[in-house]
Image: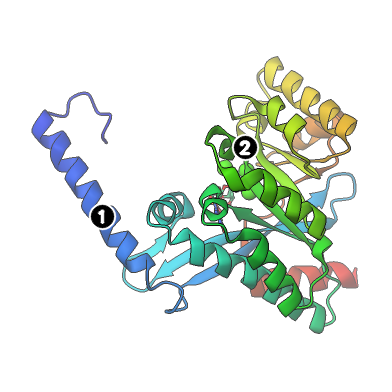
Amino acid sequence: SQHNPTLTWTQYTKTLEQQTRRNVDITMKLRHAIAADQLALYYQPQVDLASGRIVSTEALLRWHHPQAGFIPPDQFIPLAEQSQLIGPIGDWVIRQACRDLRAWHDAGIPVTPVSINLSLIQFQLGSVPNSVHKALSDYDIAPELLTLEITESVFEQHCQALQHDLEALGTMGVRLSLDDFGTGYSSLGHLKDYFFDEIKIDKSFISQLDDNPYPQAIVKAVIVIAEAIGADVVAEGLELTSQIAIVRQLGCSKGQGYHYSRPIPEPRWRQLLMEQTSL
Ligand code: C2E
Ligand code: CA
Ligand code: CA
Ligand code: CA
């Protein structure tokens, strides 16, 4: 790895070169991903922790390249952002989520709200409120069925459009969710400047709940703050029953994680929704 201290300078440079070449290669492939129909949304259930019932879902982007195989979002999203391909890719995500909502509705499946992830670069490119408005109206989707997750780190960079766009989106009636809460530099500051319907507790806190009193205190504080400002709380990264018991005891009512389900392809998600309905 790049951080291996036994690497010589020449080896290090070579590793960097390989990395750069790989990134250029991935970016070139990504340019064709939409037209070549290589992108898909997977869905991960969000459940009511008391009943275990699915109440909503997060859409997570997947890219399968016929030769390179499955490329994880942590690898290609940053490259999409650097190359501004996140513009068209982000628009594709917005529209696909609305297309899927429409298809479920038309198939007679009781629809639950869908959360999608947005990148700061999409706001900088200036397209978000228009794209959302157009997708909602093209597929005739009620705005409250769509939740936009933005990661807390967006506030670390200045973006002129952000404040205005978030207000416009709020007025439109879509829900706004603050993702990865607690990982940024000034978590509380953002809550006073913006309105959020939902706060997501980052999985790094959840994974430490078992063996450490501090994460518990932080999670508790987040839940109290969320209650005070009228926002819902979602715990992410729930893998163990012990973690679920702790967040429930701390007052969190909604969560997602591998304990319930990994993100699954749309046909399986649709199946899950139908099975739950028939219970
Ligand atoms: P995120 O928004 O924080 O999404 C949660 C990530 O945690 C997802 O990884 C999900 O599969 C994973 N996860 C869910 N439950 C568990 C669990 O119990 N344990 C663990 N260890 N992980 C869990 P994924 O799908 O690989 O996505 C990674 C990141 O890529 C996302 O983090 C998000 O920042 C970004 N991303 C994904 N889809 C999109 C998209 O459509 N647009 C944008 N801009 N970013 C996206
Ligand atoms: Ca998210
Ligand atoms: Ca998150
Ligand atoms: Ca994250």
Disc 2 is placed on an element classified as: helix
Mark 1: amino acid: Arg
Element under label 1? helix
**25 horizontally vs 279: left or right:** left
Q: Is residue 218 above or below residue 14?
A: above
Position of residue 158 measured from the top left corner of the image (x, y, whole percent): 54, 37
Q: Residue at x 69, y 48 (%)?
A: 164
Question: Would you say residue 39 is visible in this rendering?
Answer: yes
The residue that mark 1 highlights is: 22
- Nearest the camera: 41 or 139? 139
Mark 1 → mark 2, Cα distance in angstroms: 29 Å
33 up-or-down from 48: above or below:
below
What residue do we see at 60% from left, 53% from top?
118
How dense is the environment of label 2, judged by Cα within 10 Å: few (below 14), some, or many (20 and up)? many
Identify the residue shown where x is 83% and y is 36%: 252
- The image position of residue 171, as x and y in percent, is 81, 55
> Earlier along the polypeptide chain: callout 1 or callout 2?
1
Residue drawn at 37 percent across, 69 percent down: 31
Residue carrying label 2: 152
Marks 1, 2: nearer the viewer: 2
Q: Quadrant of residue 160?
A: top right
Q: In this rendering, would 267 be left or right of 32? A: right
Q: Which x, y percent locates residue 79?
A: 39, 53
* Quarter of the figure with the N terminus: top left
Q: Amino acid at mark 2?
A: Glu
Q: Residues within 10 Å of mark 1 (few under 14, many from 20)?
A: few
* Left or right side of 244 for 7: left
Q: Is residue 46 visible?
A: no
Which quarter shows the C terminus?
A: bottom right
- Classify 189 as above or below 63: above
